Amino acid sequence: MATQAEPEPATGREGRRGFARTLSYWTLGTGTLSTMLYYMGKDEIEAFDKEPPLELTLVPDTFHNGHPIVQTPHTAGRERLVVLGSGWGAVSTLKALECDAYDVTVISPDNYFIFTPLLPSVTVGTVEFRSVLEAIRRIIKRTRGSYIEAAAVDIDLERKMVLVKQSGEEMAWVPYDRLVVGVGAQSITHGATGLEFCHKLKTINDARGIRQHIMANFEKAVRPTTPLEEKQRLLTFVVCGGGPTGCEFAAELYDFLTEDLKHYFPKAVQEMVKVVIVQSQDHILNMMDSVISEFAEREFARHNMTVITNSRVQSICETALKYSTKHPDGSVTEHEIPQGFVLWSTGLSLAPFTKLLCDKLPSVQKNRHAITVDEHLRVKGVADGSVYGLGDCATVEYPHLLNHITELFDSAHHVGNTEITRAEFRVFVKEAAAKYPNAASHLLTLERDFDSFDTDGNGRISIDEFEHMLEYVDSKLTALPALAQVASQEGVYLGHGLSHLAAIYASDEDTRRKVEASPEARRGVEAQAVAPFMYHHRGTLAYLGRAAAADFGEGRAYRGSNLAAKYLWRSVYWSQQVSLRTRLLLAMDWLKELLFGRDISKF
């Protein structure tokens, strides 16, 4: 007689259901993570399917001004795009460019891109060197672009060639159809002497040198044979310049001292450490909202860091720094402080190639700090608009609305009227914002401020009141700051714009014939085809040592003195990485720092 099977225990059924549920969650989680990682690294993954770049050769038996000419790839129907530099502007252009739009050649003395906002973190070991670098050849693999490790030293605008100098004394000309200049800028001296005793923070070698110098000073300071005064000098760290780079380096140094070195060095040595910031303006971080400047100064004071304002560095020697302070009554006093380390982080000036380019266009290039470019990022003075400038080496020329006062006033009111009504003013603001996109944000606020410009209160704007209004708008149109986000936005704009032009020329034969008529015709057609560049400020970040601040413009600011602020600052920079590889390396570096602290070895 068959026996009836005993029912399965409830615990067994629940166990299998629990396992199935766990498996489904694990599958869903890993699938979601894999999809996210794929889309974050999509370009890098797909680039591996591309053929390797073609080998560069010299044009046989051909020379220009005594130097050979490089034979770069030149596909039929494509223009040759040469990009100078490997910084934010250049890399953002390359990443935004369509794959098959141009035959691309990148020329830079460094074969990598540096995520510069995290360089202060590299100096103290919060982040490792490789985590902020991305090889240029990886970035241009997607476009099958070529790379030449060299620096641009001359340009022939008529023949459309750039002279590059490679290792040693080898030089060659590289031809182009379009040229993107993104060579960055160099530090300005402000008349100070002895800068050879200072560190700068622009390259990965700068960060490595700073890291070695910091640890060397601490190791010397703990030697029993080192005199007390020498110990105090060695442990005095001076930062010249109260901008984001200087302040963030000071903050990272403070974190290094309080979170890591305090565990490994005698307390007496720790108490000798001084961090001094010398700033020429009346506040540090003066390009940000005053609320943030004051918050930063309070945070630094709380950390026992000294901020010296309204002071200019006069000279630096191996063991001391001299500076002068200007007082409210106009008097000036001289000071000298011993120093064991100086970081120079004060403003920008023309790089050698940028200066050379400006000298070749003296009638239009009169700016002493950067190349002047128009609203399409084309270098002023190049007739056909084939040379572009972006990043720290370029400044966008804004329109002076006051120069067009008659034209603008006549367009704003009806014929026969001598004043502008509120309704007419509303229409004018929208039309002017469309015509002058770089001034759009300021023009659009005028409608709200109509009554403040209507000084006589009659509900209309007269020509005199209109003039005051345009003066106000012109005063707000200042040069874009030398920030990574400015260069990045310019690069994205230029990459999309160049791709759009390539698509137009590839599909429209009439347009191709039209632009061949004259350089001016090409310039006009391309200005109509691509909208002007518009910068959108997304906020300026500053890390202040276990605190962070962000300025979003128009009086909107964030300040935080907690762990959340620190990781909010980190998450923003993590999201802005140019590759999946550096994102993963950064995450691992931050995890290592959290678990084991920073590396304190000197190497």
Image (cartoon, rainbow, N blue to C red):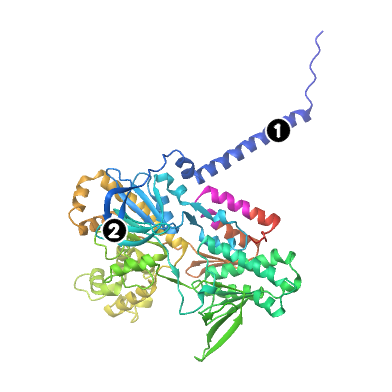
Query: In the image, is residue 139 above or below residue 523?
Result: above
Q: Residue placed farthest to the left in the image?
A: 517
Looking at the image, can residue 307 be seen? yes
485, 7: nearer the viewer? 485
Measured from the top left, where is residue 177 in percent x and y? 29, 53
Q: Secondary structure at mark 2?
A: loop
Amino acid type, residue under disc 1 in the picture: Phe
The quarter of the picture where residue 559 lies is bottom right
Instruction: Characterize the magenta stretch by its predominant secondary structure.
Output: helix
The quarter of the picture where residue 273 lies is bottom right
Q: What residue did someone put label 2 on?
A: 66
Q: What residue did someone put label 1 on?
A: 19
Query: Residue sitting at 72 percent across and 79 percent down?
Result: 228
Looking at the image, can residue 577 be seen? no
316, 327: nearer the viewer? 316
Q: Secondary structure at mark 1?
A: helix
Q: Which residues are magenta?
A: 573-589
Mark count: 2
Measured from the top left, where is residue 8 in percent x and y? 77, 24
203, 24: nearer the viewer? 203
510, 553: nearer the viewer? 510
